[in-house]
Amino acid sequence: MIDASIYLTTDGAPLPVERDLRLKATSLLVVPPFLKHFGGPMAGPAYLKGAGECAGHDVTVLDLNRQWIQERITSAHTSGQIKGDHDKPSKELSRLYQEWQALCASHWPFALVRNEWESRTVVLNAAHDEVIACAMNLAKGSFGEWVSAHLNQASRPDIVGLSVMFSGQVIAALAVTAIVRQVWPGVPVVWGGAHVTALAEPISRDAAYGQGIDGFVVGYAERTWVELLDSVASGNPWPKEVFAAATQQFRAKEDPKAVPAFDLSGYGAGSLTLPVQASRGCAYGKCSFCTYPKIEGKHRKLDISGLESVIALAAEREAVLSFKDSLLVLNQLGAIADMIKGRVMWSACTKLHPNLNLQTLKRLHSEGLRTLEIGLETLDEASQVLINKPQSPEVLTGFLDAAAEAGVAIVINYMTGLPGADAAQEEHWLGVVREEVDARPRLKAMIEHNTFQLEMISPMGLAPQAFGIEVVRRWPWSSLLEYRIIQSSAIAA
């Protein structure tokens, strides 16, 4: 709203002056520990910050995860050949991850043996009251003092948002929520992020999730975030997409034209990675173990014309752009290359394809691509049938040859421990992949080896019997299900 008031000049002539009377909200977005993420800002808060500021609101991001790590890391990180999200001090982060488990275990309502730490404090195989008790104990101790000190450095906001990406942040997020209530009584707290999206159904059915949390947001939420800030500023009811525990859930509204905004004042010299997206959802979207279709929704492209400002910032800061898309298809990789034109280094994630050949990879490398992550998952044919993701060894070896020649570093995601799989065959094919990587000395590569976990909202988790699985237990704050194999020949079936 613009108010054109009339003022007088020194000679008495009227002079119209425009004043912006738009109501503004001040907000604080908090990233709680503990994520093994260090190289740059988080994508979700950056997109919300960009959308909120574009609409005229004040949005500050407080990355307690980075702050926690930065205060405890003991050696400077030097950027390696792998760029993007995997360019991080992995050994240091693993040490701090263990220390975080120890801290949470020491505040658990009863004594935990060492081999229970991760299951209880990170995976959250625990009852609701145990998780809450641990969080409240953390809030009363040195962790609470540390969080309070950081909150007190900020001005009192009109609303606080917490980004909860996986179960390992829940205890810290609950503690931070309690501390926000103490430091700023009356300031509402809203949770969003991938983990909230994974738990949307149980949250909408159970009021126990709402202890201290005023609202939950499911999915990408730039437009909903702006509508929420508008509501807070004006005193109007919140949008329905911000729902309370034990009430109907509505998926948030995104903004395909949103551009991320970053506060880089805490980032000094050294490697820096800036997150961006060209699309959301997985272009393949058929894997039976995967949650991306449920978390991110159907595949859709974003308007990348606004990324020019982020490219310019990355060039100025000598930063790497990390495309956080679940899967960039070949024409998208080409469009990004055409836009960047080699001005900055960038990384992306894709799926094996015969056309990821030498010509393609040389062209992408010339336009700045330095690391390409691929979701290989498995070369065992029976396991490929189970997860619905066939990929041939010949396509893989052709891709490895091309990447080695083009100078593109690669990250290979590989998975073992699939339900009903032949463990010996899984190890055999993992060994084949390792041998193929080692056989190419010029290839810059790492294998990200993961063990299968049954996700609640994956196709396997939603229809376990179809995969020869029986769910034996669910936990309120965990997105993972405890299960057993009820059909030894599940893959063959």
Image: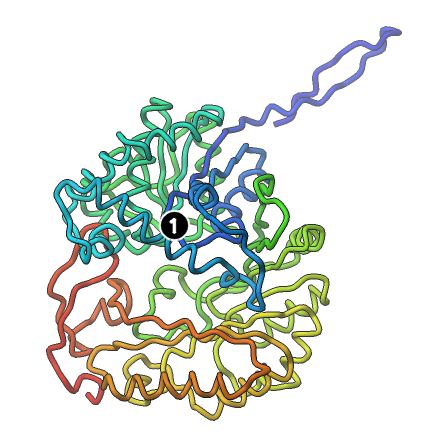
Q: Seen in the image, is 48 located left or right of residue 34?
A: right
Q: Position of residue 30 (x, y in %)?
A: 43, 39
Tag 1: Cα neighbours inside 10 Å, few (<14), some, or many (≥20)?
many
Residues 303 and 332: in front is 332
Which residue sits furthest front?
A: 74
Up/down of 248 relative to 397, above or below: above
Up/down of 137 relative to 386, above or below: above
Q: Secondary structure at mark 1?
A: loop
Residue drawn at (47%, 48%) of the image:
74
Residues 471 and 245: in front is 471
Residues 286 and 452: in front is 452
Q: Position of residue 117 (x, y in %)?
A: 22, 53
Residue drawn at (41%, 55%) of the image:
93
Residue under label 1, please give it: 193
Up/down of 367 relative to 478, above or below: below
Q: Quadrant of residue 318?
A: bottom right
Q: Position of residue 428 (x, y in %)?
A: 32, 88
Q: Position of residue 337 (x, y in %)?
A: 67, 69
Residues 439 and 482: in front is 439
Which residue sits furthest bottom?
A: 394
Q: Seen in the image, is 303 located left or right of residue 108?
A: right
Q: Seen in the image, is 431 located left or right of residue 42?
A: left
Q: Quadrant of residue 214?
A: top left
| Residue type indicated by callout 1 | Gly
How many circles with numbers are drawn on the protein?
A: 1
Residue drawn at (64%, 73%) of the image:
334
